[in-house]
């Protein structure tokens, strides 16, 4: 991992280079899941790869963070417990969301978010994150 400084319009931002991608260090990946074990596992897998994460057990608690995040990883259990907030997040065209679903989830795929079916591997998760980073360039 390499860190470098670059100025942009008079602002200095710290960038982290991970696997050839430059990330603005201030943009975290937000993980929202009611299940503490899932939250911790996803955050750990991302942090090991150099990503900054913030974890929450509800969208209400995460609202201020997910609006500014690189992306938000949302467990489908939140769809049942906070349907309005989840719908707002998933329909936000400016936001990037990854919805973690199990094979039983009856949810239509939409263009504005990506789904990842549980169980998934760390490599699966990182592949999706890297695609989102590439698309954000």
Image: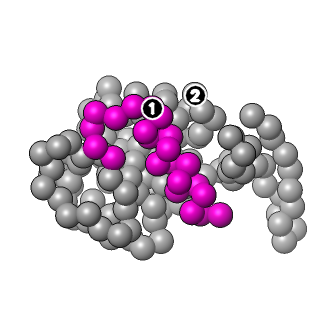
Mark 2 surroundings within 10 Å by alpha-carbon count, few (fewer than 14), some (14 through 19), many (20 or more): few
Q: Quarter holding the C terminus?
A: bottom right
Q: Residue at x 60, y 33 (%)?
A: 49
Question: Which portion, as a residue range, is magenta?
Answer: 116-137
Determine if the magenta segment contains residue 122. yes
Q: Secondary structure at mark 1?
A: helix
- Relative to 105, is 37 on the left or the right? right
Where residue 29 appears, x then y in whole percent? 51, 47
**Residue 103, quarter of the rendered image:** top left
Magenta stretch mostly in which secondary structure? helix
Which callout, 1 or 2, points to the residue nearer the camera?
Answer: 1
- Spatial distance from mark 1 to mark 2, Cα to Cα? 10 Å
- Relative to 15, is 126 on the left or the right? left
Q: Secondary structure at mark 2?
A: helix
Q: Which mark is residue 122?
A: 1
Does residue 69 appear anywhere in the picture?
Answer: no
Q: Residue at x 31, y 40 (%)?
A: 33
Circle 2 residue? 48
- Relative to 127, is 77 on the left or the right? left
Mark 1 surroundings within 10 Å by alpha-carbon count, few (fewer than 14), some (14 through 19), many (20 or more): few
Q: Which mark is residue 87?
A: none
- Relative to 96, is 100 on the left or the right? left
Where residue 32 appears, x then y in whole percent? 35, 44
Looking at the picture, tell me which residue is in the foreground, 1 or 13.
1
Determine if the magenta segment contains residue 130. yes
Q: Residue at x 56, y 32 (%)?
A: 47
- The vertical placement of 13 against 35, above or below, is below
- Answer yes or no: do the residues labelled 1 and 2 have beta carbons within 8 Å? yes
Where residue 2 appears, x then y in whole percent? 80, 37
């Amino acid at each position: 991992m390499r860190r470098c400084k670059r100025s942009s319009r008079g602002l200095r931002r710290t960038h982290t280079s991970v696997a050839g991608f430059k990330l603005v260090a201030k943009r975290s990946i937000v993980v929202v899941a009611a299940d503490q074990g899932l939250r911790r596992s996803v955050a750990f897998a991302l942090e090991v790869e150099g990503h900054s994460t913030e974890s929450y057990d509800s969208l209400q608690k995460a609202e201020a963070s997910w609006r500014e995040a690189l992306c938000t990883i949302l467990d489908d259990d939140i769809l049942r417990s906070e349907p309005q907030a989840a719908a707002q997040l998933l329909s936000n065209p400016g936001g990037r969301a990854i919805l973690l679903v199990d094979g039983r989830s009856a949810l239509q795929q939409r263009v504005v978010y990506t789904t990842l079916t549980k169980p998934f591997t760390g490599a699966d998760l990182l592949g999706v994150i890297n695609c989102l980073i590439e698309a954000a360039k």
